[in-house]
Image (cartoon, helix red, strand yellow):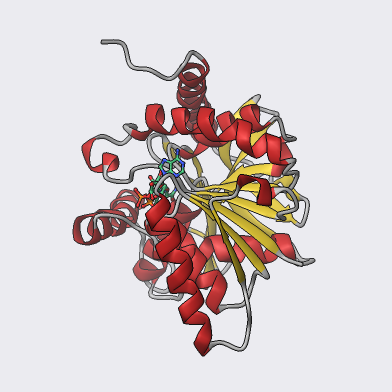
């Protein structure tokens, strides 16, 4: 039986629940939100949707105890409107949510894999791991996955190829100290110093173009969800299956003794080995800077996560 929990049923949580139901990826879904009416409404809507499906997903709501034998718990709580005010505005809020929910998740006996989407992603993933007292390999965050895919897309558009031909990673911090590791980026195996498909690609322009997609999405929709949910679905499929995948997730990286976004293998046990690539010294230094910023956020959460008046 494949059982998945989701805490936080906003834009991300409910699109993910819908997608899991219509793809038949879960036998049971445990849906939890601070808003009871939202959870009741979503359950009814998802059950109605199943009248058009051959697959069946049992929907359980507002029941932390039901997480006991779940394979995966996706955390997508927060208040994404705060992002419009200030990039790190959710830190304090989401830290306090962890203080509320972690004892209930622990009490359920949940021992599966936590996949965190809530922001600021690396610090919130680290704080979740500490408060849930699960092994770091079982608590991972989406990290710079979407930033990486936007970067690959910007490179692909510049080189007029499809993004599947581009590899490479954004490291560091999803919101904040993003590290575009150009040393890792290749198009069909060629690095960006070469003329690719007749195009000389300017890294500064690529970076701006990669960030523009996020800007357009937030300006037009007020939130972003489709890319996050689609990649979350991919990652869930890997965890429930027998393959593996390399993605830049928020993971505990022993080299930095901290959570940071870093390319890693994932498999059914959660995080596999980090992928250690030879970064340029300037990129290494930027990852260290990102790590310091994340460490400061974690320290803030550990001290109660409240702003001084
Ligand atoms: N890392 C990424 O790539 C990425 C992308 C998009 C969004 N996000 C983050 O994901 C999170 C969710 O985004 P969203 O757009 O769905 O937000 P949203 O504001 O639409 O929804 C958040 C939901 O969390 C619920 N919630 C808040 N506190 C709770 C608590 N204590 N217990 C249970 N439920 C609680 C709210 O009631 C709400 O339904 C946010 O932190 C957002 O910034 C991350």
Q: Name the residue: 31% across, 11% down.
A: 308
Residue 82 horizontal side relative to residue 273, left or right: left
Picture coordinates of residue 200, whole percent (x, y): 36, 62
Picture coordinates of residue 20, whole percent (x, y): 56, 70
User: Which quarter of the figure is the C terminus placed in?
Assistant: top left
Work out whether residue 267 or residue 112 is closer to the camera in this orientation and state it: 112
Residue 158 horizontal side relative to residue 71, left or right: left
In this rendering, is residue 34 above or below 291?
below
In this rendering, is residue 179 above or below 219?
above
Q: Name the residue: 55% across, 73% down.
A: 21
Q: In the current view of this chain or complex, which residue is farthest to the top?
A: 309
* Rendering quarter of residue 90: top left
Picture coordinates of residue 23, whole percent (x, y): 57, 78
* Rendering quarter of residue 197: bottom left
Q: Name the residue: 62% across, 31% down.
A: 103
User: Can I make out residue 276 in this image?
Assistant: no
Work out whether residue 144 or residue 282 is closer to the camera in this orientation and state it: 144
* Rendering quarter of residue 108: top right
In this rendering, is residue 44 above or below 135?
below
User: Can I make out residue 175 in this image?
Assistant: yes
Q: Name the residue: 63% across, 41% down.
A: 278
User: Which quarter of the figure is the N terminus placed in?
Assistant: bottom right
Residue 131 horizontal side relative to residue 291, left or right: right
Picture coordinates of residue 102, whole percent (x, y): 59, 33
Report the label total.
Answer: 0
């Amino acid at each position: 039986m494949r059982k998945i929990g989701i805490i936080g049923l906003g834009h991300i949580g409910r699109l993910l629940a819908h997608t899991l139901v219509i793809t038949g990826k879960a036998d049971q879904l445990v849906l939890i939100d601070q808003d009871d009416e939202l959870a009741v409404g979503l359950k009814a809507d998802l059950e109605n949707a199943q009248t058009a499906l051959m697959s069946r997903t049992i929907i359980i709501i507002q029941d932390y105890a039901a997480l006991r034998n779940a394979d995966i718990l996706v955390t997508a709580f927060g208040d994404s409107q705060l992002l419009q005010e200030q990039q790190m505005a959710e830190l304090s809020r989401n830290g306090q949510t962890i203080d509320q929910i972690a004892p209930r998740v622990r009490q359920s006996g949940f021992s599966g894999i936590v996949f965190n989407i809530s922001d600021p992603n690396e610090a919130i993933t680290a704080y979740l791991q500490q408060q849930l007292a699960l092994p770091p390999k079982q608590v991972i965050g989406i990290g710079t996955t979407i930033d990486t895919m936007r970067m690959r897309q910007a490179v692909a558009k510049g080189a007029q190829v499809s993004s599947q031909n581009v590899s490479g990673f954004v490291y560091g911090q999803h919101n904040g100290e993003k590290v575009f590791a150009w040393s890792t980026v290749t198009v069909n195996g060629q690095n960006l110093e070469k003329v690719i498909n007749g195009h000389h690609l300017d890294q500064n322009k690529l970076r701006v173009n990669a960030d523009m997609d996020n800007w357009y999405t937030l300006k037009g929709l007020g939130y972003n969800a489709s890319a996050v949910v689609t990649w979350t679905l991919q990652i869930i499929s890997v965890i429930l299956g027998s393959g593996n995948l390399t993605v830049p997730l928020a993971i505990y990286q022993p080299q930095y003794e901290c959570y940071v976004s870093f390319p890693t293998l994932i498999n059914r046990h959660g995080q596999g080995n980090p992928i250690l690539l030879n970064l340029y010294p300037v990129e290494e230094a930027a990852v260290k800077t990102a790590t310091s910023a994340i460490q400061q956020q974690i320290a803030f959460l550990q001290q109660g996560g409240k702003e001084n008046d």
